[in-house]
């Protein structure tokens, strides 16, 4: 579908003109700008443009929500019209980093590391969902499908192997992304991650039941031969050290012998530090963090669900929701499932339901169309168009979504709903939920659909909203 070139020029004008644009790039749904002066943005004019579904500023980036697919064409046309050079996401991020405080920087770093590996995690989650359908009891029959039809067991086993690979070698994925983010060679990051899950090591999953933990003797120091399967924190810290050491050596070692020195020395030193210091210390810290979070939800699952379910929407606005990707993965490794991700999926649904209600409340055709399409997007796990294009513009809609998400979160937390994987949001998220929790999760979905929709509709009608 062709785009209106005039509207693209209006977008440029509304954000202060091309002279106000330091760098520009785009993601799946949004244009991302590093602007010279955000005060020059005319938000009212910007959001009256048909192509624009919302705008917001986060982490010193000004972002304009366009929509999946269309954003690529808008960006290309904007580059043609303005003559600004195409920039990568890294270019825009670098242009905004100097303005960040330490917390913003930490959140951004985690987002930069985990977002690139999400496609692998989402794929693994979907395949695990299919495997659950084949191996779970009481879904289609009283017994599992593979028990009723043994000829399907081979297929289920192969799917399980393919699905579990991303989680089995998670440190390799994180190592690749983290070392790349910290300025090192991604290939060395992969090798570092694989070292931490080498088959000669005792699996992290077997430590608790092992009769004896094997050790290396390093000049009188006993070092445990333990792997870090499913762990995030050890490989994050090790990747940072590896990248910094590699960059240091590249600056100091003559070019003629760099291949013989840089990678071997950086990898050997980082590997030794990983097994001697980094791994044991960060593994302990990760267990403390996991125990603390689990303890909070065990103490009061309803309160925990209310707080996290309600806060997730506001966390998305700040970008801080990326912090919890690492927590989800740690929970999956430690307790074989995460109780946080199901609440994320319900938050998606709640935002979509509030946006859908606005379609029946508003009298403006443009807002009706935006509300409908953004609701579908949120129901499929992408909430930015619904949040920034509709719900935040009408605060009662956003607050209704938060309340619905909080109540749904409290319910599924009380029922102990767990997800086997992360990445699948919105309505399809049930595929990542353990089959024995489906009934409770579906009730949570019903709450997330009904409460925001009804509240938004009633409040909107009482206000006689003219949006």
Image (cartoon, grey):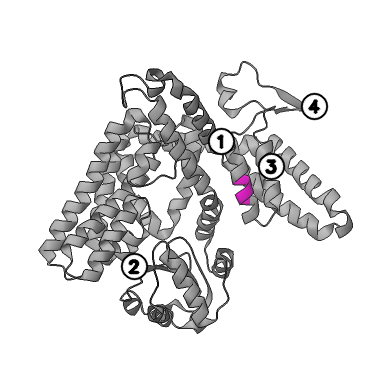
Q: Which residue is mark 2?
A: 53
Within the image, what quadrant is residue 83 found in?
bottom right
- Residue 140 belongs to magenta span: no
In terms of sequence position, does the residue under pointer 4 or pointer 3 come before the other?
A: 3
Q: Which residue is mark 3?
A: 192
Task: Give the crowd class for mark 3: few <14, some 14-19, many >=20 residues within 10 Å.
Answer: many
In terms of sequence position, does the residue under pointer 2 or pointer 1 come before the other?
A: 2
| Residue 262 located left or right of residue 20 | right
Estimate the x, y position of residue 399 in percent, counting from the top left.
Answer: 25, 56
In terms of sequence position, does the residue under pointer 3 or pointer 1 come before the other?
A: 1
Q: Which residue is mark 4?
A: 220
Estimate the x, y position of residue 391 in percent, counting from the top left.
Answer: 27, 61
Task: Give the crowd class for mark 2: few <14, some 14-19, many >=20 residues within 10 Å.
Answer: many
Residue at mark 4 to residue at mark 1: CA–CA distance? 36 Å
Residue at mark 4 to residue at mark 3: CA–CA distance? 25 Å
Q: Secondary structure at mark 1?
A: helix
Is residue 31 shown to the viewer in this render?
no
Choose between 136 and 42: the one closer to the eye. 136
345 is higher (above) or lower (below) than 143: below
In terms of sequence position, does the residue under pointer 4 or pointer 1 come before the other?
A: 1
Q: Which residue is mark 1?
A: 165
State which region is magenta: 174-178
Q: Secondary structure at mark 3?
A: helix
Residue at mark 3 to residue at mark 1: CA–CA distance? 17 Å
250 is higher (above) or lower (below) than 429: below
Estimate the x, y position of residue 236 in percent, counting from the top left.
Answer: 61, 46
Task: Give the crowd class for mark 4: few <14, some 14-19, many >=20 residues within 10 Å.
Answer: few
Estimate the x, y position of residue 416 in percent, counting from the top left.
Answer: 33, 32
In terms of sequence position, does the residue under pointer 4 or pointer 2 come before the other?
A: 2
Q: Residue at x 36, y 80 (%)?
A: 42
């Amino acid at each position: 579908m062709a785009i209106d070139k005039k509207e693209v020029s209006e977008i440029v004008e509304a954000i202060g003109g091309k002279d106000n644009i330091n760098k520009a790039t785009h993601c799946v749904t949004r244009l991302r700008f590093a602007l010279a002066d955000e005060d020059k943005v005319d938000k009212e004019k910007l959001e009256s443009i048909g192509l624009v579904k919302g705008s917001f500023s986060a982490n010193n980036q000004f972002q304009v929500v366009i929509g999946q697919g269309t954003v690529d064409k808008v960006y290309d046309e904007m580059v043609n019209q303005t003559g600004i050079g195409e920039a990568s996401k890294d270019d825009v991020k670098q242009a905004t980093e100097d303005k960040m405080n330490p917390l913003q920087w930490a959140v951004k770093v985690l987002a930069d590391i985990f977002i690139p590996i999400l496609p692998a995690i989402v794929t693994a989650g979907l395949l695990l969902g299919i495997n659950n359908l084949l191996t779970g009891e009481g879904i289609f029959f009283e017994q599992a499908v593979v028990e009723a039809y043994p000829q399907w067991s081979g297929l289920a086993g192969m799917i399980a192997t393919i699905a579990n690979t991303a989680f089995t070698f998670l440190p390799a994925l994180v190592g690749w992304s983290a070392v790349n983010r910290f300025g090192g060679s991604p290939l060395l990051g992969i090798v570092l991650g694989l070292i931490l899950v080498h088959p000669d090591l005792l699996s992290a999953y077997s430590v608790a039941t092992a009769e004896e933990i094997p050790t290396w003797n390093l000049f009188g120091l006993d070092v445990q031969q333990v792997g870090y399967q499913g762990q995030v924190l050890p490989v994050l810290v090790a990747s940072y050290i590896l990248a910094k050491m590699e960059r240091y050596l590249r600056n100091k070692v003559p070019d003629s012998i760099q291949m013989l020195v840089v990678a071997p020395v950086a990898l050997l030193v980082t590997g030794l530090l990983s097994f001697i210091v980094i791994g044991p210390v960060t593994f302990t810290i990760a267990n403390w963090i996991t125990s603390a979070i689990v303890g909070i939800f065990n103490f009061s699952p309803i309160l925990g669900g209310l707080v996290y379910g309600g806060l997730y929407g506001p966390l998305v606005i700040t970008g801080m929701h990326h912090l919890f990707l690492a927590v989800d993965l740690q929970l999956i490794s430690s307790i074989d499932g995460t109780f946080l991700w199901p609440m994320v999926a319900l938050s998606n649904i709640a935002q979509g339901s509030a946006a859908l209600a606005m379609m029946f409340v508003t009298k403006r055709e443009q807002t009706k169309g935006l509300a409908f399409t953004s609701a579908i997007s949120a129901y499929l796990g992408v909430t930015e168009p619904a949040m920034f294009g509709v719900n935040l513009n009408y605060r009662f809609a956003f607050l209704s979504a938060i309340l619905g998400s909080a109540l749904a979160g409290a319910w599924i937390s009380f029922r102990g709903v767990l997800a086997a994987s992360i990445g699948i949001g919105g309505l399809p998220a049930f595929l990542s939920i353990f089959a024995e929790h489906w009934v409770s999760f579906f009730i949570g979905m019903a709450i997330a659909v009904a409460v925001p929709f009804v509240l938004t509709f009633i409040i909107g009608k009482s206000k006689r909203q003219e949006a």
